[in-house]
Image (cartoon, rainbow, N blue to C red):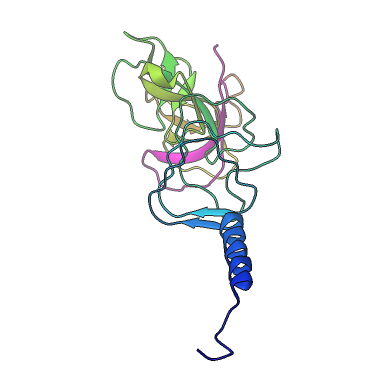
Amino acid sequence: MTKESYIPPYRIKDLEDTIEAVAEACVHLAGAETITGSKTFSAAQTFTGQVTSSNIVPQTNDTYNIGTADLAYSNIYGTYFSGTAYRAYWGDLAENYVADEIYPAGLLIQFGGDKEITKAVTKVNGVISSQPAFVLNDTEGGLPVALCGRVPVMVEGQINKFDKLCLSNIAGIARKKKWYEFWKHTIAIALESNHKSEIKNVLCVTKFNLD
């Protein structure tokens, strides 16, 4: 043993204490680990495997985050949410209603028919949503009906951006509202242009009523 490789016993004890302290301060768990009691992590921890737990309780109220602006989780699943939600990816508020048949996204509907909703013929109360931001009565079944917001609407004829829309003579389909048709109810305003003559979905901002 050379002089350079010799470590006195008291230095070995100091080295062991240092290694233990570093391991306690920064833990990297790559495999399955089980913690049976309450455990408080006061420093950064990295878990690369699946974490199974019961309650996760923060040390301080209204202080800590889950994820960051640059490192976000994908989907979060749960039964109930209690808190403040102020941002959604999609753009309309929808509620599920039972329809008398299966309708495609963008079709205008009215309350009535054999169930709760049917194709809009005499008035417009909503539109079948394709990707609602929020869905009310999600456990009740039925089709998501957009009550307001940005949503695709089925339209016939050429449309320019910001054209006002009204119900056409085709059930469930909108068309451009002519400038003199002041008696017709405006159901939407187009947010994009589409110069195809056939029926197609056009992104609109909508606001319906019960009349």
Q: Position of residue 196 (x, y in %)?
A: 41, 47
Instruction: Say which residue appears at 54% left-offset and 41% top-offset.
Output: 89
In this view, 39 is above or below 7: above
Magenta stretch bounds: 184-211
Q: Position of residue 176 (x, y in %)?
A: 51, 34
Q: Nearer the viewer, residue 166 or 57?
A: 57
Residue 188 covered by magenta stretch: yes
Which quarter of the image is occupied by the C terminus? top right
Given residues 61 and 140, the one toward you in this image is 61
Which quarter of the picture shows residue 81?
top right
Residue drawn at (57%, 48%) of the image:
67
Closest to the observer: 80 or 95?
Answer: 80
x, y (%) of residue 102?
29, 24
Please say whether residue 140 is one of the residues in the magenta stretch. Answer: no
- For the question of whether residue 119 can be seen, the reply is no
Residue occupying the point 36% across, 41% down = 198
